[in-house]
Amino acid sequence: MRNMFTGNFENSVNLMRSMLKRDKMYIIIWVVLLVAFSALLAPGVNAMFPDEEARLTVVQIYDNPLMISMMGPIYGKDAPGGFPAGAMYSGFMLVWVILAVSVMNLFYVVRNTRGDEERGRAEVVRSLPVGRLANLNATMLSALIMNTALGLFTGLGIAVMGVEGIGFGGSMLYGLVLGLSGQIFAAITAVFCQLSASPSGAASLSGITLGALYMVRGAGDSAGNDFLACLSPMGLASRSQIYVENYIWPSLVIILLTVIITALAFRLNTIRDLGQGFIAAKPGRAEAKKSMLSPFGLSWRLLRTGLIAWVIIMFMTAASYGSVLGDLPKFIGDSPEYLQVIGIPEAMLDVMSDDAKAEIIVTYFMAFISMMMTLVCIVPAILAAMKPRSEEREGRAEHIIARVVSRWKYMCGFVTLAFILSVIMQFAVAFGLYSVTESILETNPIVFSELLKAYLVYLPAVWVMIGFAVFITGLLPKASSAVWGFYGFVAFLSFIGGMVDLPEVIKGISPMHHIPQLSPTQLPLGELSYPPLIILTVIAAVLTVAGFYFYGKRDTLTGM
């Protein structure tokens, strides 16, 4: 009988190559986006806060329990050589990028383990001369290659930017911490893939664990309890004090924990049956709920967890912006770069009193945030509108469409939820921003009704994005990536359009460009230009109707 270290891992390398080949676009897109985000933002942070005084001012503003719980502690404020730009960059960025890297690994591991089991691929592979643990081993090895590439290119990318205060050693440690954080979460996800009986269950448990680890870190950091914060890999990563002390011991602890958790995943995999999990799936109801007897009820059942999570996340994000609203004029007013980002001409402030400056800065910042938050709110709306396409790929849609349910009714449930969600998300963001501002400021400069109108005015642009997603789903289902390409183009124009002199015809492609840029605190609806909003709404309706028409005419999984 072959021992565990020969037969159980047989042909792991061949399986790993197959996974890397199959998922190469997934890996390339994630790695390129994360590397570009980390590398390109480094000089931007240094440009906005070019000297130590400006950096210390920002850190002092963020030095409160709420912001520390969100981002983690910022080290180096009392460093002998002065507060380096890299310390502020790492303090602001590290936790958020680790969250993104964790999500990347979550989907990758679930797809290549539980996902392959549910689709029947794992059973076919197991019928060949491969070891019992080969599939899990190949997944972890390919995840290791992905995270190694991410860490290496991130470190090199930041280093080649040549930003003062962001040295080569610290940059490479930053990349190492990102890669190790991704690998430990790949191991955590691998454990839940053994415990759960389904891909969705494994993804949900992993996502809940990621959120719990984030909150444990936040609770420890805000309370100054290092032990509690270090129970989370994100808390350990922060203790590296990158660009300040550059400690290596947190990375060694993360490596040790990764090995232990990975070994646990392998052990669980050896004692469970293929397609089963240690947490048994709950038996279904004898009869479906009445709400499940309609296409809309089915759509809501499939999407409700994700949609509710998105609403909560956006509410909390908006609340975090509201918590610093009172301190904004203090550090934005002295930063020409920040003023340019939010669209305030510096000459405008030179002739204003201090009170007027504070009011105009808050006003423009709120307008900028409304645009940025709307861009984020578009993501779940697009995901809901494109759910029929993912159901087709998983082979579930054909079982419903083959019955008496028409294609149009089936798609209508998902698209209707997408449009409803677009309104709810805008309301949640406006309420989150207003409620926290109301609770922390003696005099709230925001009127809720006017703030809500400022967010709702973006709805026609959001609807165009939803309509485009429906149109592509109906006409060109295999080109669904074009929806995200267009979204990336819109987001890019929204951020840099005011700072770069681009041709009007290019700016005009983005629906966000046609939304009137009005003050969220003083929205003069009587002076609002309605024709652009009406035109955008008509375009959204035409795209949606065309998408329904083509979806009803085409074959499943194919175009026209």
Image (cartoon, helix red, strand yellow):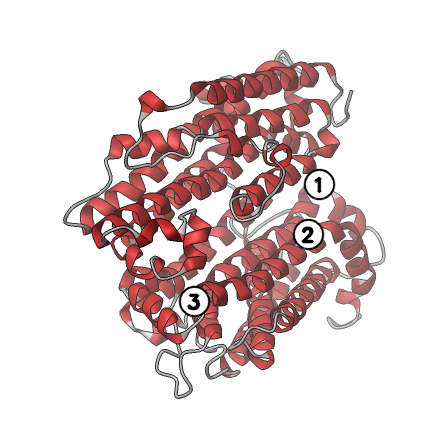
Relative image position of residue 143 (x, y in whole percent): 67, 62
**Do the residues bearing badges 2 and 1 touch, measured as CB atoms within 8 Å?**
no
Relative placement, left or right, of 76 versus 413 is: left
* Residue 109 visible to the viewer: yes
At 30% from the left and 46% from the top, the residue drawn is 360
Which callout, 2 or 3, points at the residue further toward the start of the chain? 2
Give residue 29's mark: 2
Q: Name the residue rendered at 73%, 33% in the picture.
A: 479
Dot 2 falls on a residue whose secondary structure is: helix
Spatial CA span between label 2 and label 1: 24 Å
Viewer can see residue 236 = no
Residue type, mark 1 in image = Arg
Instruction: Pick the residue in front: 391 or 2.
Output: 391
Image coords of residue 412 (percent x, y) = 55, 18
Asked if residue 355 is positioned above or below residue 394 in the image, the reply reads below
Look at label 3 and name its amino acid.
Phe
Q: Residue at x 59, y 19 (%)?
A: 544
Q: Position of residue 400 (x, y in %)?
A: 63, 20
Front of the two marks 2 and 1: 2
Query: Which quadrant, please, contains the N terminus?
Result: bottom right
Going from the N terminus, do you reach mark 3 or mark 1 first?
Answer: 3
The residue tagged 1 is: 119
Q: Amino acid at mark 2?
A: Ile
Which residue in the protein does label 3 denote?
A: 49
Residue at horizontal 49 percent and vertical 22 percent from the top: 532
Q: Helix, strand, or loop for circle 3?
A: loop
- Secondary structure beneath dot 1 equals helix
Q: Nearer the viewer, residue 320 or 527?
A: 527
* Total numbered labels: 3
